[in-house]
Image (cartoon, rainbow, N blue to C red):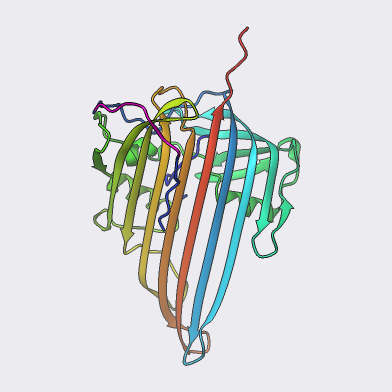
């Protein structure tokens, strides 16, 4: 399971890593964020993600009403690549579950989404991520909705991480920065319910350092971007007045390009504002805030030698 960043729309609070500098020299490195998968490869994964939403509505001169919701999921297991596209991006994978729970932060209680040894199947179907259980097991609607917050598969033909955040084949040294590919990112938004003009997108990627993580020589890379004038349809008799999206990630990318990223942290925040009228003709204002964080750790499983 390779975790896409914003290729599926998947604050900005970046993950803190305990880093050990790999070298004090200003060496340059090949930048490759997308690491081709191979069918049959397996990885240990630890995936934690949270989605928080808040909507404030005000009708005429009445007091504002606020609705809040939170989805928090922790998943540990072993993933196996089942299918890839021409670029080596995963289009189907399975996760054998050790632990998969939804957490209620208010009551500090957990609800099991998939039992231990259950097998979650994620696959691309007409540009969407389809989730199911192996052997025709039933995945509840609540479980599927919660898991889609942090799990997605690549759609063939769509930009990958290198296409959006890569350095265009240029080698980079620690401290170097380069721009996000705004054209590719605009394409990603156009495939969702949202849309954005390339000129309203800005962002920067940075090679922070060459470092060692869990004994593996890596490149510590961070990125952040902002989308202004984000358009998300609000419904009948509703006019959008504002829309912004901010995203960021920090990742540890092994210098051995055959290995996947071994640690990753993502954050995204979207704010939308609308005005309109109710079914009875009263003036209405709506403000929505959406925040998502994803943290993952990946440990490749080395096949046993024959």
Residue drawn 45% across the image and 74% down it: 287
The residue positioned farthest toward the bottom in the image shown: 61
Q: Is residue 22 magenta?
A: yes
In the foreground, 257 or 272:
257
Q: Quadrant of residue 22?
A: top left
The residue positioned farthest toward the top in the image shown: 306
Tell me the chief SS of the magenta region: loop
Residue 305, image x and y in percent? 61, 9
Q: Is residue 112 left or right of residue 156?
A: right
Number of callouts: 0
Span colored in magenta: 18-25
In the foreground, 167 or 155:
167
Residue drawn 41% across the image and 46% down it: 249
Residue drawn 32% across the image and 39% down it: 208
Q: Is residue 162 left or right of residue 141?
A: left
**In the rendered view, would you say 150 is above or below 162?**
below
Residue 173, image x and y in percent? 25, 31
- Quick one: quadrant of the N terminus? top right
- Quick one: quadrant of the C terminus? top right
Confirm whether residue 8 shows in the render: no
In the foreground, 219 or 47:
219
Q: Is residue 207 magenta?
A: no
Q: Quadrant of residue 297?
A: top right
Confirm whether residue 71 shows in the render: yes
In the foreground, 3 or 47:
47
Q: Is residue 194 left or right of residue 103?
A: left
Residue 168, image x and y in percent? 26, 33
Residue 172, image x and y in percent? 25, 31
Q: Is residue 260 left or right of residue 224?
A: right
Residue drawn 46% across the image and 32% down it: 261
């Amino acid at each position: 399971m390779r975790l896409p960043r914003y290729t599926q729309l998947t604050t900005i609070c970046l993950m803190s890593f305990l880093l050990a500098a790999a070298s004090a020299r200003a060496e340059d490195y090949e930048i490759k964020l997308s690491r081709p998968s191979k069918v049959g490869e397996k990885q240990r994964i630890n995936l934690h993600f949270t989605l928080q939403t808040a909507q404030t509505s005000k009708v005429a001169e009445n007091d504002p009403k606020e609705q809040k919701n939170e989805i928090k999921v922790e998943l540990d297991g072993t993933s196996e690549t089942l299918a890839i596209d021409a670029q080596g991006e995963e289009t189907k994978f399975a996760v054998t579950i050790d632990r998969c729970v939804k957490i209620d932060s208010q009551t500090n209680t957990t609800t099991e989404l998939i039992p231990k040894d259950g097998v979650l199947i994620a696959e691309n179907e007409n540009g969407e991520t389809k989730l199911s259980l192996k052997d025709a097991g039933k995945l509840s609607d609540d479980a599927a909705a919660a898991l889609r917050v942090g799990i997605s598969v690549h759609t063939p033909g769509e930009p990958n991480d290198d296409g959006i955040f890569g350095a265009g084949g240029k080698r980079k040294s620690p401290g170097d920065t380069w721009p996000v590919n705004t054209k590719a990112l605009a394409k990603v938004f156009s495939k969702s319910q949202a849309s954005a003009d390339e000129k309203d997108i800005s962002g920067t990627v940075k090679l922070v350092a060459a470092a060692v993580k869990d004994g593996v020589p890596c490149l510590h890379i961070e990125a952040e971007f902002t989308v202004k004038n984000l358009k998300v349809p609000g419904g009948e008799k509703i006019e959008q007045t504002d829309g912004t999206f901010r995203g960021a990630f920090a990742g540890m990318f092994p210098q051995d390009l055959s290995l996947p990223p071994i640690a990753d942290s993502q954050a995204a925040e979207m704010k939308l504002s609308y005005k309109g009228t109710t079914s009875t003709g009263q003036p209405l204002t709506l403000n929505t805030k959406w925040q998502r964080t994803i943290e993952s750790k990946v440990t490749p499983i080395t096949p046993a030698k024959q």
